[in-house]
């Protein structure tokens, strides 16, 4: 497949946004991305944004990836969330056996999804056997392959250890057809992500379909993107999704203010000084959050390209910027929602779903308040 450079992916995202926006109600109703949206994402190469170029992917800069998700999120948060999840999962290709990576990603769809780390896999001749169920697999309904992060047990059942004494954790990959998916995602927001559970029973995983995730010594690719690791990529990507949701919600409130009269005797909202001031302050908050997030990502990427290192300081900076951006985006959405008044509670208007989606995003691991504690601890320690 041909390389799709970053700016081209961002332009393509803007181009298909109207299609996604038209499908958003159906995505919400069915709790799945629609076939036409999935086809458009595949056709435009979006799932391959972070796949190595050596495997036919785009291998774009982290900023281009973020911009792509931001544009998609303006149209529909669930679509952007699934795309972000599956795109970052594809980064595991940089640590996989090359033939295995080709088999997974260079097919008609070539989409990988996975959930949270849990359970164990037992080492056997030629690979591993596992019986387990995992949760939170966003994008699993579009995926052709699934993955899981598991602790490894030796053949005798004892835990295998790394050189530093920590438990050995591997990412195992298997065809989606090998698993049973459980429809459990009945959530307040991000309804269309299909963030369901999946289960396998006595499944054999060949050694070549396993890898160490986010371990620099295990990388087979030299590009700076793969030094970042999936954890930071998820944080930056989902923070960009939150910016897209906030931008679309505030834009909807501004459009409403140009026309709406709160009562029969009141003037148009746009002429109200309090409304004007609120819009100005909220616009400033959103622009500040976006500038901070992208400045952090750009500085990190510049250093990474120059040194090849993604160190503790970069990890801390990314964590702080992503967490703060999600929280600020939530405040922007809340302000826009309240500004819209009773208009916002109706499903026919562009507020209610985005309000729920934003609050679902704010409950994810990337937005935990404990991240501030981790960063603060590093700061006071002189890091």
Image: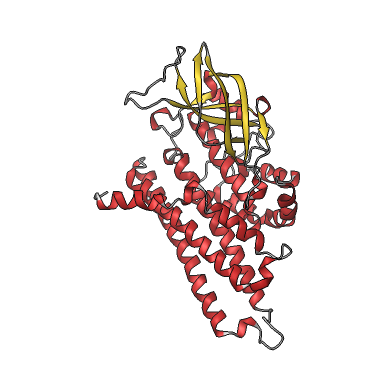
Q: Is residue 19 left or right of residue 51?
A: right
Residue found at the far bottom of this picture: 265
Question: Residue 171 placed where, x, y %?
Answer: 50, 28
**Residue 274's image quarter?**
bottom right
Question: Residue 306 placed where, x, y %?
Answer: 35, 45
Q: Is residue 160 left or right of residue 265?
A: left
Q: Report if residue 9 is visible in the image.
A: yes
Q: Report if residue 70 is visible in the image.
A: no
- Quadrant position of the N terminus in the picture: top right
**For residue 77, above or below residue 117:** below
Q: Is residue 162 left or right of residue 221?
A: left
Number of numbered discs visible in the structure rendering: 0
**For residue 108, above or below residue 281:** above
Given residues 36 and 175, the one toward you in this image is 175
Residue found 57% across the figure and 57% down from its top: 358
How was the colour assigned to the protein in this rendering? secondary structure
**Residue 345's image quarter?**
bottom right
Question: Residue 112 placed where, x, y %?
Answer: 60, 34
Q: Is residue 7 left or right of residue 267?
A: left
**For residue 66, above or below residue 45:** below
Residue found 42% across the figure and 17% down from its top: 158
Residue found 46% across the figure and 41% down from its top: 231
Question: Residue 203 placed where, x, y %?
Answer: 60, 20
């Amino acid at each position: 497949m041909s390389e799709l450079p970053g700016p081209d992916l961002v332009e393509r995202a803007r181009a298909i946004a109207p299609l996604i926006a038209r499908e958003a109600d159906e995505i919400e109703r069915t709790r799945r991305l629609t076939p036409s949206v999935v086809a458009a994402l595949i056709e435009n190469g979006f799932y391959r944004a972070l796949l190595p170029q050596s495997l036919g992917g785009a291998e774009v800069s982290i900023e281009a990836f973020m911009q792509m998700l931001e544009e998609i999120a303006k149209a529909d948060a669930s679509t952007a969330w699934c795309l972000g999840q599956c795109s970052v999962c594809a980064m595991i290709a940089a640590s996989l056996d090359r033939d295995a990576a080709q088999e997974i990603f260079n097919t008609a769809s070539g989409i990988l999804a996975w959930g949270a780390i849990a359970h164990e896999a037992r080492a056997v001749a030629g690979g591993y056997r596992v019986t387990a169920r995992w949760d939170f697999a966003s994008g699993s309904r579009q995926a052709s392959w699934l993955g899981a992060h598991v602790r490894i047990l030796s053949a005798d059942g004892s835990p295998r250890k790394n050189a530093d004494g920590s438990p050995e954790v591997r990412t195992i990959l298997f065809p989606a057809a090998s698993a049973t998916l459980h429809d459990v995602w009945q959530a307040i927001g991000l309804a269309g992500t299909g963030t369901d559970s999946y289960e396998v029973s006595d499944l054999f995983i060949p050694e070549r379909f396993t890898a160490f995730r986010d371990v620099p010594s295990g990388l087979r690719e030299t590009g700076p993107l793969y030094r970042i690791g999936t954890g930071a990529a998820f944080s930056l990507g989902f923070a960009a999704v939150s910016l897209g949701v906030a931008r679309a919600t505030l834009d909807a409130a501004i459009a409403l203010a140009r026309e709406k009269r709160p009562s029969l005797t009141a003037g148009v909202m746009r002429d109200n000084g309090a409304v004007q001031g609120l819009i100005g302050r909220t616009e400033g908050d959103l622009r500040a959050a976006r500038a901070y997030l992208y400045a952090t990502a750009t500085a990190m990427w510049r250093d990474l390209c120059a040194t090849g290192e993604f160190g503790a300081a970069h990890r801390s900076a990314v964590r702080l910027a992503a967490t703060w951006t999600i929280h600020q985006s939530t405040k922007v959405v809340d302000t826009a929602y309240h500004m819209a008044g009773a208009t916002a509670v109706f499903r026919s208007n562009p507020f209610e779903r985005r309000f729920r989606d934003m609050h679902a995003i704010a409950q994810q691991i990337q937005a935990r308040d404990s991240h501030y504690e981790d960063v603060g601890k590093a700061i006071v320690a002189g890091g």
